[in-house]
Image (cartoon, helix red, strand yellow):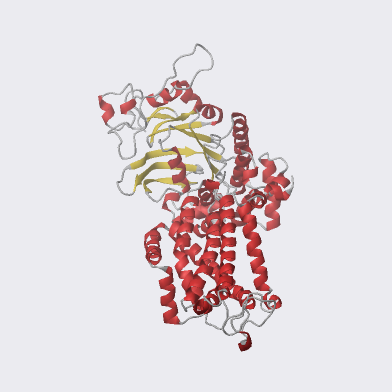
Amino acid sequence: MSEAATTPLGAMWRRLRRNRSFVIGVALVSIIVAVAILAPLLAPHDPLRNNFRARLQPPSAMFWLGTDHFGRDILSRILHGARISLVIGASVVVVTGILGTAIGAIAGFFRALDEPIMRLMDAIMAFPAILLAMAIAAVMGASVTNVVLALSIATTPHTARIVRGSVLVVREMEYVEAARALGASELRVLFRHVLVNTTGPLIVRLTYVFAIAILAEAALSFIGVGPPPPAPSFGNIIANGRDFMIVAPWITIFPGLAIIAVVLGLNLLGDGLRDVLDPRTRI
Amino acid sequence: MRGADAFSVASPNARPATPPLLAVEGLTTRLVGTGASVLDDVSFEVEEGETVCVVGESGSGKSMLALAIMGLLPPAIRIAQGAIRLRGQDLARLSPAEWRARRGRDLAMIFQEPMTALNPVMRVGTQVAEVLRKRRAMSDQAARCETLRLFERVGIAHAAARFDAYPHELSGGLRQRVMIAIALATEARLLLADEPTTALDVTIQAQILDLLNDLRRDRALGLVLITHDLGVVAEMADRVLVLYAGRVAELAPVASLFDRPMHPYTRALLASIPAIEGPRKRLAAIDGAVPAVGAMPEGCRFRPRCQLAAARCTSVPPLAQLEPRHHAACWVTAPQDTSP
């Protein structure tokens, strides 16, 4: 009886390894994360340095993915841009994870607060996320922090709703009643018995939030309210290439492919996790 | 600061001798909105080392009674009247926080479904040890040792290996033993068991019942055993409380209940046990179902299903004492000259 084979985590890990979309997703995301971390070592050029003798160069041995209108190396900008995009995505995941869990847990567990909290969440959800983010950036200025803030506010309601749903199910379980019968306080019941049993759907949701945040960052940068230039992000590299799409399509195509790779990887990873964690879709 | 001394100090109107372990007195619970009664005027006592079985059909209020004693009634149901005295101290008059402090110390409960009554993401040993650490202030090390000792006491083989198991790795019988170990970890004198064997195989059932019986004798536990299985009653009970639609139909020592059932409902229940020997007959069943809360008939609540129902059954029959310790609430079969 080997330890790994008998724990729930061990059993889950074995199912995950057999799930093709999870494996591909993890591979894709891992490569991108590794590349982002190692960007300063991998990048052949300084992503910020202008080189007016090499403006709008097509891909070549010198500039693998070409250059933009300032002569900056697109490959180097994508590698460094991945860092900002991933940091924004990860930050949104953390902030939304904390806010969504807290709000969802309170709404689901303390029923008197359920209606007011969830109706407020509905109100936020009814508001288009991009519009909300633009409004926040317009008021507070375009910065990485404000993009994270805006996207977190936009993605929290759905996350809270998912956590609340899980809490509503778990709070009625007999082991929750059993914990009360042993004199556990309500807070202890919530943290030790309810929340720990709601992590599955939350983890799946957060992988999608990661992908949504990266896409939304690109959209915000494209319309000019993302992380301010000259620092590269996937979105603002594409934005820079917008005016040169006919003469220098490589400026927009390659960061676009990078976004596709990250979002595809995260979605595959999320799908795999959902298949394994959500018993309803288990075959 | 626990034990008999604490209680006698706590109750100013000192009673003669030791009060019973548990005395439920005229307990009435009501739905908050409509005021319909769920339990109505339920009284019984449990002494140390005594097993009281609570029997009745689904919907008779058995589980509600257990939850009421634990102080775990759903928010929509409130205790309207009556007392739940644990060694003389009325739990129903405690604040929710004080009542909570008694749970897991003086009161413990075993649940019906060992499949779902353990937290699936916690190791079973941890779940027992946590009670010891939180409720009896043991160190991690002491709690681990005591957990292993309790596992052995409740008949879990390979206790050390099972400590780190998750609930889903154990069989139903083992899980129920873990539940019992958790209940023992509290050192509560009063143990409520809500159909503890219903979800188990028959052979495992017998083992678990033996274990409960054994522990009751060993530790002089007061055991309230909720069941709808009259076989379990015959085997386990010292006294039997027959509940019907939230009211006490009959309360009697087990032998006298089986020999001389007084209430028509008890008689019907006993008649519905299929006989193993003798010619095969149609099973006797009680027609109809327990009336819903809020739609109770006037007077005796069993009246619509009772074959002996008479005109006076439209008023509520008192619980009359027929023999020493044998009480029944029926106008027809229980002579009323010795009202309690």
Side of B214 where B301 appears, left or right: left
Considering only vertical position in the picture, is A199 above or below B30? below
Residue B107 visible within the image:
no
Position of the C terminus of chain A by quadrant: top right
B278 lies above or below B11: above
Q: Is residue A260 above or below residue B45?
A: below
| Residue situated furthest front in the rendering | A247
Kindly identify the residue that appears in the image at 69 percent across and 79 percent down: A62
Q: Position of residue A274 (x, y in %)?
A: 56, 53
Question: Image point 66% across, 78% down: which residue?
Answer: A63
Residue sitting at the far right? A2
Tell me where residue A180 appears, x and y as whole percent: 51, 51
Q: Position of residue B286 (x, y in %)?
A: 39, 24
Toward the left, the furthest residue is B311
Q: Residue A265 in the image: x percent, y percent? A: 60, 61
Say left or right for B246 vs B152: left
Depth check: give the residue in front, A210 or B195.
A210
Q: In the visual, does B251 lie left or right of A90?
A: left
Q: Residue at x 68, y 39 (%)?
A: B155
Q: Report the front residue among A231 and B163.
A: A231
Quadrant in the picture for residue B246:
top left
Q: Tell me what residue is drawn at x 64 percent, y 50 percent.
A: B123
State the residue lying farthest toward the top.
Answer: B279
In this rendering, the count of numbered labels is 0
Image quadrant occupied by the N terminus of chain A = top right
**Residue B297, visible in the rendered structure:** yes
